[in-house]
Image: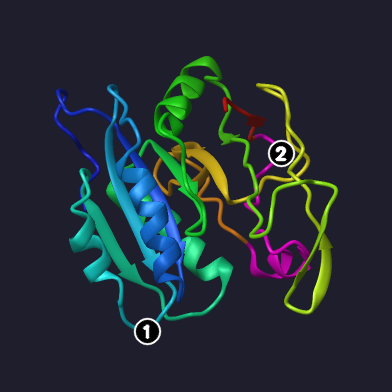
C-alpha cells in the first residue's frame, strides 16, 4: 500500500483492538468507540485483529454500522505478542501517523480520541502516550474489598493515577497512543513487542519495547 497522500488529505489516526473469543466484550467496546468524538485534524480508521485461524467477528461489525472505516484481520499464531504486533504492522502499512490502542474488554469515554489528539499537540516530543484506566469489578468497586476470581482471592484496586506528562513505570497496552516514530518501518524504528519479555510480565500486560530514545508520558484523562 502506498504511503504517499495528496496534500489535502488529513493525517491518519488509527485505532487498534486485539480480540479472542470475547464477542460480547468486543461488542461493548465498539459501542463505546461508536459514541466517541472523532478528531478534526485526523482521519480515523479502526483496526481489529482477531487471534484465530479465521475471522468470526464480521457480524458484530456489520450490526454496529460504525462511523469509521474498519480493517479486519485474523492472526493464527496465538499470543499477545503476535496479535499486537499484527496491529502495529497494519497501522504501518496504512500509513498511520498515530496509533491508539485499547483492549477489547474496555470501554472508552466520549472524549477518548480527542484527548489523545490534544495530548499529541501538547507533548510534541512524546512518542508513547498512556491514558488512565478505571477498573470495574462485578460485585462493587470499593478498593479495599476482596473478591474471589477464578479460585483466587484478589484485592480490588485501581491503577495509580499519574500527572499529565509524568513518565509511567511500565508502558502497558490497555490505553495508549504511539507515534509512527515508534512502529513505522519507513520513518521510524519499527519497535515491536518481544515475546520473551511479555512472558515475564506477571500482570498479563504485554510490553511495548522501546529504545531509550523514545519518550513515554502519561496524558489526559
The image quadrant that residue 48 belongs to is bottom left
> Is residue 204 found inside the magenta-colored segment of the image?
yes
Q: Secondary structure at mark 2?
A: loop
Q: Gap between marks 2 and 1, in whole Å?
A: 36 Å
> Is residue 176 found inside the magenta-colored segment of the image?
no
The residue depicted at 40 percent of the width and 56 percent of the height is 28
The residue depicted at 46 percent of the width and 36 percent of the height is 109
Residue 73 x %, y %: 32, 68
Q: Secondary structure at mark 1?
A: loop
Circle 1 residue: 53
Residue in the foreground of this view, choosing between 134 and 189? 134
Residue 217, above or below 27: above
The residue depicted at 24 percent of the width and 69 percent of the height is 58
* Side of 20 where 57 appears, left or right: left
The residue depicted at 18 percent of the width and 53 percent of the height is 65
**Badge 1: few (under 14), some or many (20 or more) residues near its Cα, within 10 Å?**
few
Residue 83 x %, y %: 48, 67
Quadrant including the C terminus? top right
Residue 136 x %, y %: 63, 51
Residue range corresponding to the magenta coloring: 194-213
Question: What's the mark number on residue 119?
Answer: none
Residue 187, above or below 195: above
Circle 2 residue: 212
Residue lying at the far top in this picture: please name it: 122
Count how many numbered circles sit on residues in the image: 2
Amino acid at each position: 500500500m502506498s504511503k504517499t497522500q495528496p496534500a489535502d488529505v488529513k493525517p491518519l489516526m488509527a485505532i487498534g483492538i486485539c480480540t479472542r473469543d470475547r464477542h460480547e466484550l468486543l461488542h461493548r467496546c465498539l459501542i463505546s468507540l461508536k459514541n466517541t468524538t472523532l478528531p478534526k485534524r485526523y482521519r480515523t480508521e479502526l483496526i481489529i485483529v482477531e487471534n484465530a485461524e479465521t475471522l468470526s467477528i464480521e457480524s458484530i461489525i456489520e450490526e454496529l454500522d460504525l462511523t469509521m472505516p474498519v480493517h479486519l484481520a485474523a492472526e493464527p499464531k496465538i499470543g499477545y505478542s503476535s496479535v499486537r504486533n499484527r496491529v502495529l504492522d497494519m497501522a504501518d502499512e496504512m500509513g498511520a501517523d498515530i496509533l491508539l490502542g485499547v483492549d477489547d474488554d474496555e470501554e472508552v469515554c466520549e472524549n477518548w480520541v480527542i484527548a489523545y489528539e490534544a495530548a499529541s499537540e501538547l507533548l510534541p516530543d512524546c512518542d508513547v502516550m498512556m491514558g488512565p484506566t478505571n477498573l470495574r469489578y462485578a460485585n462493587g468497586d470499593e478498593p479495599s474489598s476482596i473478591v474471589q476470581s477464578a479460585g483466587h482471592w484478589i484485592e480490588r484496586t485501581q491503577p495509580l493515577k499519574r500527572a499529565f506528562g509524568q513518565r509511567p513505570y511500565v508502558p502497558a497496552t490497555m490505553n495508549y497512543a504511539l507515534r509512527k516514530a515508534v512502529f513505522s518501518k519507513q520513518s521510524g524504528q519499527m519497535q515491536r513487542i518481544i515475546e520473551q519479555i511479555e512472558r515475564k510480565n506477571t500482570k498479563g500486560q504485554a510490553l511495548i519495547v522501546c529504545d531509550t530514545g523514545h519518550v513515554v508520558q502519561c496524558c489526559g484523562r
